[in-house]
Amino acid sequence: MDVSKIQGNIERGVPVRSVRIRVGRSIDGFGLSPGITQVQRNTVEALMKNAFKKLTGDLEGKYFPLAGMDEKTRQQLVDDHFLFMSGDPNLQVAGMERDWPEGRGIFHNAAKTFLVWVNEEDQLRIISMEMGGDVRGVFERLARGIKAVGDSVKTESGKDFAYDKKYGFIHSCPTNLGTGMRASVHCDLPGWTQEGLPALKKRCEELKVQPRGTRGESGGQTGSTYDISNKHRLGYSEVQLVQCMIDGVNALYREDLELQKKHDQLALQQMSEQQYVFPNIKSKHSLVAKHVPKARWDKLCKIVTKTSGFTLKKAIACAVEFDNQHCGIYAGDWDSYKDFAEVFDPIIQEYHGIKSDAKHTSDMDVTKIKGNINEGTPVHSVRIRVGRSIDGFGLSPGITKDQRIGVEKLMKNAFTKLPGDLSGNYYPLTGMDEKVRQQLVDDHFLFMSGDANLKVAGMERDWPEGRGIYHNAEKTFLVWVNEEDQLRIISMQKGGDVRGVFERLARGIKAVGDSVKAESGKEFALDSKYGYIHSCPTNLGTGMRASVHVDLPGWTRAGLPALQKRCEELKVQPRGTRGESGGQTGNTYDISNKHRLGYSEVQLVQCMIDGVNTLYAEDKALMTKPAPAASAVPFPNIKSKHSLVAKHVTKDKWDKLGSHVTKTSGFTLSKAIACAVQFDNQHCGIYAGDWDSYKDFAAVFDPIIQEYHGIKSDAKHTSDMDVSKIQGNICPEVPVHSVRIRVGRSIDGFGLSPGITKDQRVGVEKLMKSAFTKLPGDLSGNYYPLTGMDEKVRQQLVDDHFLFMSGDQNLKVAGMERDWPEGRGIYHNAEKTFLVWVNEEDQLRIISMQKGGDVRGVFERLARGIKAVGDSVKAESGKEFALDPKYGYIHSCPTNLGTGMRASVHVDLRGWTAAGIDQLNKRCEELKVQPRGTRGESGGQTGKT
């Protein structure tokens, strides 16, 4: 470890970001990580805690045990990239993660350049590191650190590091024997990146070094930054390995400079060749595919617009990237519509059904509107929006960063000039206060990133910079800044006063336009042919969408195809209340104008008013007619041929029930059996969308429930949460790690997760937020909504294994992940032993848990918790948990009916592991219990737990 023998260092100019050298050490007399006993591991930690106190000078620091680590410390170690974590399958199977996180921890000095991991893969991982390229300095500190730690261990315990004359320093993995050293730098090698990884690996082999991605051996590599380290451990001294790494990195960088020159020349050549190659348009039936032939592409592909440097290639990116586009084109600025007119003109004319010589007329005169939504029409709310773009700035797909910030700056000033009932506040997305953000989420005002189309079209660049939301005090006038359009101006309110909403919108648009003009001298971009300019040509003209949310139970009975056909005749458009692709539940529809261009604003609003009034008049007539024959709904192909659904949903039953819609949440048998239809691996394959489902579709549910649970048709369910009736407990010597008991509960009057409407789900959450505040004593705690969750809170819930997430295919197909994550969240008490999930698979999952084997104690807390939650819900709303005399507590999945309870322990069963899983399964069947791996039903099992 003699640093004076190192010749030279990383050469000046080599783009090395950081240096890190680590070795492993094992203290003689203790087991290595795969075999170390719990007592030995704790003794190593205790020894090291004392030994660390003896370190002096720049090596002096603090030790942070993983067990009981506070959140602030944990987060800091995460931020510093110092924290090691569980979860590596190799280490788990090798036995190195037993008793996690006991006996493990991290020491580092004040400067964070000297670090020791205790009881990770080796007893000790001793590390020296720093930013920059001073390998000699890092090696010198490491040498001093190893000696200081070794001396301190010797003083404390009389023990030495385990050293073998043949194999050097002893490690748990034989590949680390010898020096146990990995001396590495993070270095930028753009030339080698372009040359390719195989070429870099071959050259590194010659130089006796090893390239990795910057995320470690299996973490992959991004960009041009590599981790270059010594390849060998055994058969070479530490000095030799460090020298080899220094010389290798210097050689690689000299060669990298030459490779950069080579590839720069090739890139220029390829750019000129590739940039203008006619693209493969995946959306074969799109308007882009029809109107961008090769001849037109060749003519226009080299044009770059003046305002934002936009090209035809960028304009049609969505049609090229996706195979599901109807239109498939966006404009990056007003220039795009002019410079690429040969493409845009025919697309716009075909989409909007206008002639080539058409002119657009705008008319916002509310006095021309005749009538309003008729009294008695069950309209929940009205919302009218338009888009506007300020001349001289790019549109969202092409806008430059400076232009976007310029638009926001201009609007911040313009908003301050809005008068009267339009005046309010602007909330920039960048740096938004959590309380403000949560309020905007609760008000359904916040727009978010993540839309695949907008991303590919270039509209989410530099997110969230330059974007924000303005609204007035009454929350009836709203402006989105730099979303899909520069400005989305919105007027809305509860009830059905369309005229009033339109009048406010007209005033608002004028006020915003006047304020922009006064502030900058700029006007809204208005084309004599195409009206107000928007990024998407489908919005040209008025850019207006005037809509109401209205209940149409008669049309729901008639079926969506019939409603869509009628709306087409009335020149309006029906959607689900969650937007264009969000689907529809219950009887509530979003009805809006269909057209944008070729009609004035007054005409479109009038058309919507008349259309809604007509639809509701017809709806009342439809409700007086008998329900349509069920046979109108085709009998589905049930892919899960061996499921209970396949057995009990016969064509006769389908013809009788297929068109029935439940009252509470508008659920159907088709929705109920979606998983059995979609997948071929279901055993049960059915979910209920509300309590009505079990009653209305009893001819299907009853035999499935009876067969699955093994009960008779006249069975009754009895609930009993009396802990005093429990005899005994888990014996003290049984090696139980933890106990967890959960039940599901549903509040009467709301849909279950597969069918629950958005309003109902939000209603359940709102009710529970209030109910949770009433929980007493050791049950009291905090509720954490998933929507708008702070990152620190989210990470803590992950660490506690409390967070539930989206992505389960069954839950998605069953409809349980609609509107994710809205209306969902997690409650837990201060001790983290009582937990409630809100609106996951069930409305409520109530959970009691703790370390150790006290099942009685966990059950007692659960019983108190269920009663307290139920009492609080009753006090808050007058509602009870849905309890059926036959099937017990109502759940979305019929397999959970009855108690909805899963009472479980994590227990070590070494003998049964040796006997084999088949034997254990058989014995558990006899005992009426169920064995799983510790990662759940399908998560598998490791070790003996």
Image (cartoon, helix red, strand yellow):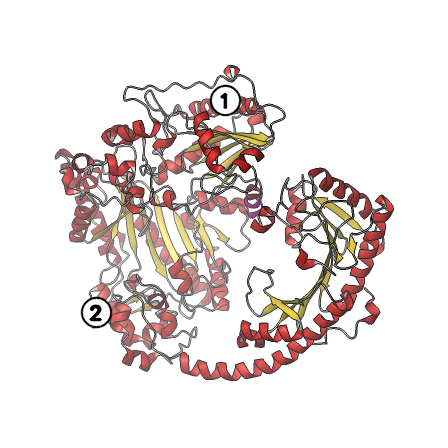
Q: Secondary structure at mark 1?
A: helix
| First to last magenta residue range | 791-795
Q: Which residue is mark 2?
A: 358
Quadrant assignment for the N terminus: bottom right
Of residue 318 and residue 131, the one placed in the foreground of this image is 131
Residue extending furthest right? 155
Q: Which residue is mark 1?
A: 863
Quadrant assignment for the C terminus: top right
The residue under the point 56% across, 38% down is 944
Q: Residues within 10 Å of mark 1 (few under 14, many from 20)?
A: some
Percent across and percent down for residue 715 are 31, 19
Lateral position of residue 599 relative to residue 129, left or right: left
The residue under the point 84% across, 70% down is 4
337 within the magenta span: no
Of residue 294 and residue 208, the one placed in the foreground of this image is 208
Percent across and percent down for residue 580 are 31, 52
Q: Quadrant of residue 535?
A: bottom left
